Image: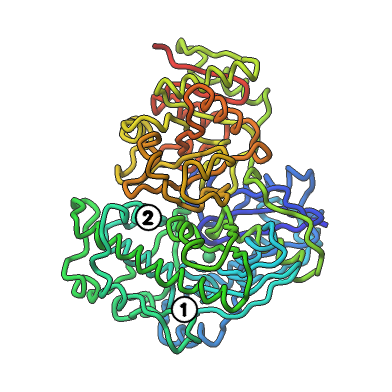
Amino acid sequence: MNILGVNAYHGNASAALVCDGKLVAAVEEERFNRVKYAAGFPAAAIRYCLQVAGITLADLDHVAVPRNPYARLGRKLFYALRMPSFARERARVISKFTGIPAALAWAFDSDPAKLKASFHRVEHHQAHLASTFFVSPFDTAALLSADGLGDFASSMWGLGTGNRMRIDGAIAFPHSLGLYYSAVTQYLGFLKFGDEYKVMGLAAYGQPAYLQEFRDILRFDSNGGAFGFKLGLDYFTHHKTGPEMSWAESDQTPTLGKMFSEAMPRRLKAPARQPDEPLEQRHRDMAATLQARLEEVYLGMLKKLAARTSAKAVCLAGGVAFNCVANGKIFDATPFEQVHVDPAAGDAGLAVGAAFYVWHQILGKPRSFVLDHPYWGPAYSAEEIQSAIRSSPVSQGGHSIAELPEEELLRRTAAIIADGKILGWYQGRAEWGPRALGNRSIVADPRRPEMKEILNRRIKHREIFRPFAPSILAEKTGEWFEKSHPSPFMNLAYSVRPEKRDKIPAPTHVDGSGRLQTVTREANPRYYALIQEFEKQTGVPVVLNTSFNDNEPIVCRPEEALDCYLRTQMDALVLGGTLITRPL
Ligand SMILES: [Fe+2]
């Protein structure tokens, strides 16, 4: 039985295919159309999923869409009456969604009558919860989804047992942890969709000096069953102007309108920072307080969820679950002993969630799949890689190009890293979700304090305050970090042990933390072997890992990896079994 999940007409458009209860493929549209966070209809992602399974649209039994325009209809109508622009937006969205079968047929030049699939609308947060629980290793787990907004809710929680999820509650628009973070991110002068990540990095440079103010901006809600939170709405505008994200029809780049009101700068006694203005200490302190207050509320919710469910494990999804700093504190702040975070915790993950929701929650099928690695995207054959090399300027520019036996390739590659060079590392299927996890990565020596600055200057061109991440051999985690719970998808940050910090300064953040990826031989044998070889040569079982890109979506095809290698002056590139090095 083939179930296609489609996140369409929304940021992070994506598709996923589940065949007989097992994930077969999952990919974001941005990897194909090269527009970061692309919204719109993910035709290329769907095409890829079908191709992996060797099926056509006519072979689909179910299509699941993670949006239910009829969820919370009363509240939607209430706001639609107060905001005509919002009503128009709702109508536009609903018409897009009801047209998905036609869009599918159109994109594939197929006769709509040949589509035999049943269509399902899965409520946004139920899809988030399904995306994390149904593929987790846990039979029983507490569930929490938290994001900006989806189907007019911003959070949902419950309990998962076997092939069922029980929903216990939700927090509806306009109250939202995600929009709280986004609004203050905008106030701090970071205006692009997805910039919350930058502010989380900035927070480590400040002190939470504004807690009184931020506790007024984001409040505990004692009337909401002592579980929830509410926004101090005076500081926001989204409840008046409408909450929907829009996207440019031309290139599908999503944007969010201004979300903070003039009361925010008044309360914080400082004007909003403009993007081109310098960052001052007060901005760092505000970022630190934004994060500290998020943790108070988020961890407080998780603590209560643990008490209500008595579960030892928790499954997390929604954009807020990307907050690896808060996630890393779960073990100390709550009774939870195990955590699973969706690798595509943002809205891309909805495609997987909607498909598994149909398989388990609607069809009642038993669990038979665990997402134990993130490699569900496109792969390219050795012939395709060789053809890309032959057509690239690298084949004419004096670069050394060598196809090497695996052992020698790993030995030479580890030596290149240990020598302080920057390596592009490209192999196998692309990662699902926004983190590069050893198949589309740039790898560098973590022992060199200057590496962060070198990477930023030569390759990444991003803000200097943003940290780089470590990949560590999983069994060594406890020796180097103060926690040892697996973090296979780079969604947890732990403190680096104080005695190890000067051994891996490059991926250790200013507060001593690292957003780590724990690497196992089972999940990624070749990346594991590379780190093991690096350890053999240096004594350090850690490499610095950052995504293979330069202010663009992570490279997907070998041609894009070659272009990025050439454009950014990387020193070396492993492309499948080929090692390419730059002339001295
Ligand atoms: Fe969401």
**Left of 5 or right of it: where is 201?**
left
* Quadrant assignment for the N terminus: bottom right
Q: Is residue 260 above or below residue 254?
A: below
Q: Position of residue 252 (x, y in %)?
A: 48, 54
Q: Earlier in the sequence, mark 2 or mark 1?
A: 1
The one nearer the camera, 38 or 180, is 180
Residue 370: image tag: none
Residue 151 occupies quadrant: bottom right
The residue where tag 2 is placed is 195
Percent position (x, y) of residue 204? Answer: 32, 53
Name the kind of residue labelled 1 in the image.
Phe
Q: Element at badge 1?
A: loop
Image coords of residue 186 (percent x, y): 31, 62
Q: Amino acid at mark 2?
A: Asp
Check the picture and name the quadrant holding the C terminus.
top left
The residue sitting at 22% across, 57% down in the picture is: 274
In percent of the image, x 47 and y 41: which residue is there?
480
Distance Cα–Cα, label 2 vs label 1: 22 Å
Q: Is residue 29 at all visible to an observer of this figure?
A: no
Crowd tier of the residue under label 1, counting other residues whose Cα lies within 10 Å: few below 14, some 14–19, many 20 or above: many
Q: Is residue 524 visible?
A: yes
Q: Quadrant of residue 565?
A: top left
Residue sitting at 51 percent across and 85 percent down? 75
Locate residue 82: give its quadrant: bottom left
Position of residue 321 relative to residue 380, above or below, is below
- Residue at 25% across, 54% down: 275
- Is ligand 1 closer than 8 angstroms to the Cβ of mark 2? no
Label of residue 173 in the image: 1
